[in-house]
Image (cartoon, grey):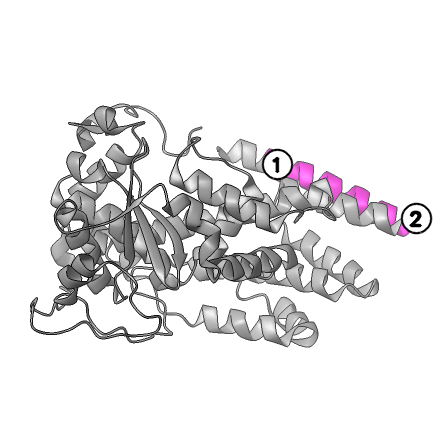
Amino acid sequence: MGTEQLDSGHQAAQAKFAEAQRAYERRRVNQAVQLAQQALEIDQTYNEARHWLAERYLEMDQLREASREYQDILHQDRHDQKAWERLEEIDPTAAARLRRLSEIAPDPFVVRRQATADMNAFEPLEEAAPSDEEPMQEVGQPWRGGGEQAEELAGIAAEVVPVAAPPAWEYEQDREYLDRWLDEPVVHQITTAVQQIASEAEVFAPLLSQCQPADKQHHIQIIAAAGRASQRLGIQPPQLYIVSQPALYPCLLTDSPAILVVPAALAQVTEEAELLFLIGRELAWVRSGYLAARQAVAIITERPAEAGDCAETVRQVIAEHCEPWDADLAAQAKSRLKKLGHAWQQRAELSADRAGLVCCQDIHAAGTAIAKGTMKNAEAASGVTLEQFMDQFAGQEAGGQ
């Protein structure tokens, strides 16, 4: 977007805000609030309008709405002292959370952006040598996988130690947007339902009946990749199931315990490092604990995947258990939720990509894996190269539609 377009947008927002102020002077408060909201839809960086709107919310004793506006101001300008003072007064919990976020160290991926093409820029992760004599240590939920699978993973599974701090690969705005996402009452309602679903094994039984447990004889590459990715991410290996479907992306059903469904054709069309990337990026949602929030995005944005794919089946199952989540939502509120969910998901998916990269430690393989994953089926993905994939976008701007 050029400078002229930005200026035009800000001018339109100013005009709309002026209407809001005039409506307020005529004591048409509801109309004034709506006009101010429209001004912010035009220009989300218009903090003067946000301050004004927050004050109106305070006058109406709508503290939650006022808190949200002050948080939005501080997400854009951490040095706005007035916003800090107001937020600490009306919502000290949110203020404390933002203070913590502002103290998180800079993202090492941003610091090292010039070195991303060379995986030597990352500190090598220490790996315990595989040993068939050492049994897997049980942490948290008991292992429920098949005997052969458990035996194969036993030598490479490491003890899981809960870690409170964000992982080093996490995108710098990931948790900032996550906090805003989880702060929404509807999102909290859905994530609570998702967590309840995950505790009821029979919910996904129809889906798993169409899969087969991974076994060492037929799925050794997938089992090995899952074990290595789990070790590098510091989590317990997942229960693995294999499914026949066109889509080539693994699908995480639950995260406690972790149940991962992997397309049967994936090992046939990917190299070792590519497979490790794709499985690692999906297991990253276990490490982050974001799966329920991610599934809430799928429900609220209402973006179905291809019919018959595991991810779409999971979305439908969860949606059925969460209905009617939008019964009391106005169209404008629903639209805002969709935008907020999409904004967080963009950042969280980037974090997952980085986790996959840490697992495979090969940036070219990561790019090739992404390219293959966009293909409709294994036949189309076979032989696809990163260079061929990138040639499709030659001459296009990165931000273009």
Q: Earlier in the sequence, mark 2 or mark 1?
A: 1
Query: Is there CB contact under 8 Å for labels 2 and 1?
Result: no
Coordinates of residue 64 in the picture (x, y in percent): 70, 64
Q: Secondary structure under badge 1?
A: helix
Q: Amino acid at mark 2?
A: Arg
Relative to 34, does residue 182 appear above or below in the rendering? below
Residue 364: name its quadrant: top left
Query: Dot 2, how many residues are within 10 Å of its Cα: few (below 14), some (14-19), or many (20+)?
Result: few
Q: Which residues are magenta?
A: 8-26
Residue at the spot 29% in from the left edge and 49% down from the top edge = 241
Where is mark 1, residue-wise? 9
As shown in the figure, which amino acid type bears the numbered disc 1? Gly
The location of residue 92, given as percent across then percent down, is: 63, 76
For residue 215, side relative to residue 350 (left or right):
left
Q: Tag 2's secondary structure?
A: loop
Nearest the viewer among 360 and 45 is: 360
Crowdedness near tag 1: few (<14), some (14–19) or many (≥20) residues, C-alpha within 10 Å: some
**Residue 20 on the magenta segment:** yes
Could you tell me which quadrant the C terminus lies in? top left
